[in-house]
Image (cartoon, coloured by chain):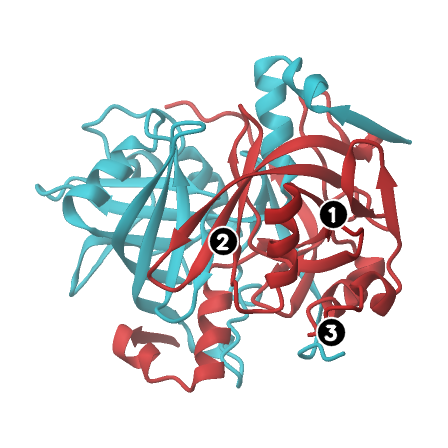
Chain colours: A red, B cyan
Amino acid sequence: MQKTFSAQDIQNFEQRYHATFINSLTGFKSVALIGTANEEGHTNLAIFNSIFHLGANPPMFGFVVRPHSVERHTLDNILRTGSFTVNHVQEPFYQQAHQTSARYPAHQSEFDATGLTPLYREGCAAPFVQESNIQIAAEYVRKIDVEENGTLIIIARIAAVYLPEDCIANDGYIDVEQAGSITCVGLDSYHRTTRIGRLPYAKP
Amino acid sequence: MQKTFSAQDIQNFEQRYHATFINSLTGFKSVALIGTANEEGHTNLAIFNSIFHLGANPPMFGFVVRPHSVERHTLDNILRTGSFTVNHVQEPFYQQAHQTSARYPAHQSEFDATGLTPLYREGCAAPFVQESNIQIAAEYVRKIDVEENGTLIIIARIAAVYLPEDCIANDGYIDVEQAGSITCVGLDSYHRTTRIGRLPYAKP
């Protein structure tokens, strides 16, 4: 049975119900851990499900930050150092990844709190997540203020990529499913995937 | 075996390989059909995999448009009329959905070309996709120029939602998997999902 919700119906939802409803409405999302460090090397790790492809040339992506949420340490570190890592979430550590969304005190690293392992690589001050199969080093480009709701869209550039060689197809396609990456809906629902098919370039 | 790709390595990729690689690197994405009409009621339908949640209050989302691509008819119609629809893609019509990415001549509607069915509802000039289980009426808010690569980020507001009543959980979570929605990677890889779990709100 199909149900209709007007803008007014949605507005009248209880606050938490409202957030959960709208958050799941846009469907499946990427889910990744963003690793950062401040100037003293103190690390931070936070789960993000808003990372989106922005363009291949130059290689860029964007993501959404709520500056007054738990994500603010990540944002502060990115703005100060210009550098961060993006690490795909896989099933063996998805519960630890989710746990990084807890409001830990500023002095406590989510790496310590969740047992995930920081991995350092030359040329990147921010830590990678060793458990992750697909790791990206990224450089901050700029931020866009979304005054309608106080969020920021962060634009970043891909600086380096680390992934299993056998998950790259002959045409450059990265088989993230084979690498074990998962997807999510809303703020708390995690899903594994099964490929239906890859389709050829569409022509009229 | 893990492989490293520097920014220079990626820059040196052949153009098509490069686009495919970067496009799949950000992982799983939502996949939806955007329906529009121009002032004369001529319809357009295009597949988008860049729709991202931007905030619940007001209920907003964003998506990326390449103004010089096949997506330009969609963009023109949105800018002229301010109104469009977002329709989740499900497995029974994913090949037709993919086919909307072909460069049809301006006078030919992708509804006619692919056999998908336009559905009109009061209060929205743009057509929905009748085959889709989750349909959203949306209003254009504004566009953001991404001068780094010539793309646009379109910001929009949710005006109404139509979905199966039995896929809404008690807490407002929309079970898009139960509704049959699928996810995609890159420009051509489609995947169904299996829930691993929903996790409770994380506390330290």
- A160 on left or right of A25: right
Of A116 and A186, the residue lying toward us: A116
- SS at circle 1: strand
Share a chain, discs 3 and 2? no
Of B116 and A177, the residue lying toward us: A177
At label 1, which amino acid type do we have?
A: Asn
At label 3, which amino acid type do we have?
A: Pro
> Which residue is located at x 41 percent, y 63 percent?
A150
Chain ID, mark 3 = A
Indicate the position of residue A76 as horizontal and vertical percent values.
61, 55
Disc 2 and disc 1 in contact, CB within 8 angstroms: no
Share a chain, discs 2 and 1? no
**Residue with the mark numbered 1:** A87
At label 2, which amino acid type do we have?
A: Gln
Chain ID, mark 2 = B
Choose the circle earlier in sequence order: 3 or 1. Answer: 1
Indicate the position of residue A38 as horizontal and vertical percent values.
73, 52
- Using a 10 Å C-alpha cutoff, classify the residue at mark 2 as few (fewer than 14 neighbours), some (14 to 19) or many (20 or more): many
**Residue with the mark numbered 3:** A105
- B46 on left or right of B41: right
**Residue with the mark numbered 2:** B90
